[in-house]
Image: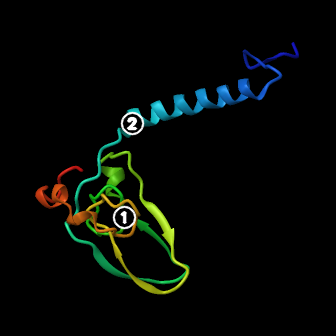
Amino acid sequence: MAGVVAGLRTVGSCAASAELRWNQIRLFSSWLSKWFPRKKPVIAQKKPIKVFLKAGKTYKWCVCGRSKNQPYCDGSHFFQRTGLFPLRFKVEEDRSAFLCSCKATLKPPYCDGTHKNERIQNAQEGSPL
């Protein structure tokens, strides 16, 4: 049969194809969330960390807040099954920067001063956002 592919009928529109892809993504993400439930990031520190970044080098910024190598990822997100993954970034020129360690920044991985707000200052280090 020309209209059947692996038990599914093909329709002459892109909508059916997009729906099939969406269903595959949804099935995969539900399987993934079963094994890696998404947890909230925790506050690693209440102040940013000043670092020197080298041009062209790829860095992995810790998103979960559980790394012992702050502000960089050490793989703790995987072993603690957080469902969170590090943010990879590169800089174009050598420079110093303040990287966020409260994990509440709106400009990751860079500090935007969010750690100064009352909610972060009143929270304990290691507590979820």
At x 26%, y 58%, the residue is: 66
Q: Where is residue 110 in the image (x, y as percent from the top left)?
A: 38, 70
Residue at (26, 62) in percent of width and height: 102
* Badge 1: residue crowd in 10 Å (few <14, some 14–19, many ≥20): many
Q: Which residue is the site of mark 2?
A: 35
**Contact between labelled residues 1 and 2, with CB atoms less than 8 Å apart:** no
Q: Distance between the residues labelled 2 and 1?
A: 20 Å
Look at label 1 and name its amino acid.
Cys
| Residue 59 spot, x, y in % from top left | 45, 71
Q: Which of 96 and 59 is in front in this view?
A: 96
Q: Which of 68 and 43 is in front in this view?
A: 43
Task: State which quadrant residue 15 falls in.
Answer: top right
> Where is residue 98, by image quadrant?
bottom left
Q: Name the residue under label 1.
A: 73
Residue mark closest to the camera, 2 vs 1:
1
Judging from the image, what secondary structure is the residue with disc 1 in? loop
